[in-house]
Image (cartoon, helix red, strand yellow):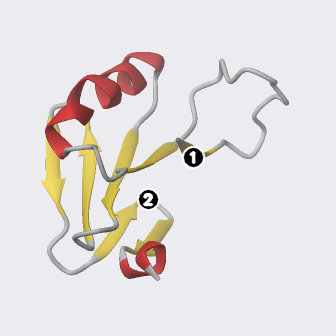
């Protein structure tokens, strides 16, 4: 898991302050349906959104509480953050 932390987030060895955005990249053994529990844990912690990236299929999803949407134009977006899925694949 990677994450974007808030500007004034405390320097914590173990993250207790929820990040703004978490990023998960599927491994070869992973399937997208296995990530539902993981992202729900993030949301319970207070994370607002999670990007999930399948680098093998060059696909990406934006997960927010109650929603799980595949990006259609190949660009993951949330608030001020934006990243083409292809940037992870290359």
Percent across and percent down for residue 80 are 50, 64
Residue drawn at the location 27% of the way across and 40% of the way down:
64
Q: Secondary structure at mark 1?
A: strand
If you read the primary sequence from the N terminus, does the residue marked by circle 2 or circle 1 appear first?
Answer: 1
Of residues 26 and 20, the one nearer the viewer is 26
Q: Residue at the spot x=41%, y=76% of the render? A: 89
Q: Quadrant of residue 37?
A: top left
In this picture, residue 51 sits left or right of residue 59: right
Q: Where residue 23 sits in the image (x, y, percent)?
A: 46, 49
Q: Residue at x 46, y 23 (%)?
A: 46
13 relative to 50 in the view: left or right: right
Q: CA distance from mark 2 to mark 1?
A: 17 Å
How many residues crowd mark 1 within 10 Å: few (<14), some (14–19), many (20+)? few
Q: Is residue 23 left or right of residue 15?
A: left
Query: In the drawing, what numbered circle is on residue 79?
Result: 2
Of circles 2 and 1, the one toward us is 1
Residue 5 or residue 88, whichever sits in front: 88
User: Which quarter of the figure has residue 8?
Assistant: top right
Disc 2: CA contacts within 10 A as few (<14), some (14-19) or many (>=20):
few
Helix, strand or loop at mark 2 = loop
Residue hosting label 1: 2
């Amino acid at each position: 898991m990677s994450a974007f932390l808030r500007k004034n987030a405390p320097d914590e060895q173990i993250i207790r302050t929820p990040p703004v955005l978490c990023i998960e990249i599927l491994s070869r053994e992973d399937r997208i349906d296995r990530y539902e529990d993981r992202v729900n844990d993030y949301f319970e912690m207070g994370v607002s959104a999670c990007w999930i990236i399948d680098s093998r299929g060059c696909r990406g999803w934006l997960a927010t509480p109650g929603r799980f949407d595949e990006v259609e134009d190949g660009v993951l977006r949330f608030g001020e953050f934006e990243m083409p899925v292809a940037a992870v694949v290359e």
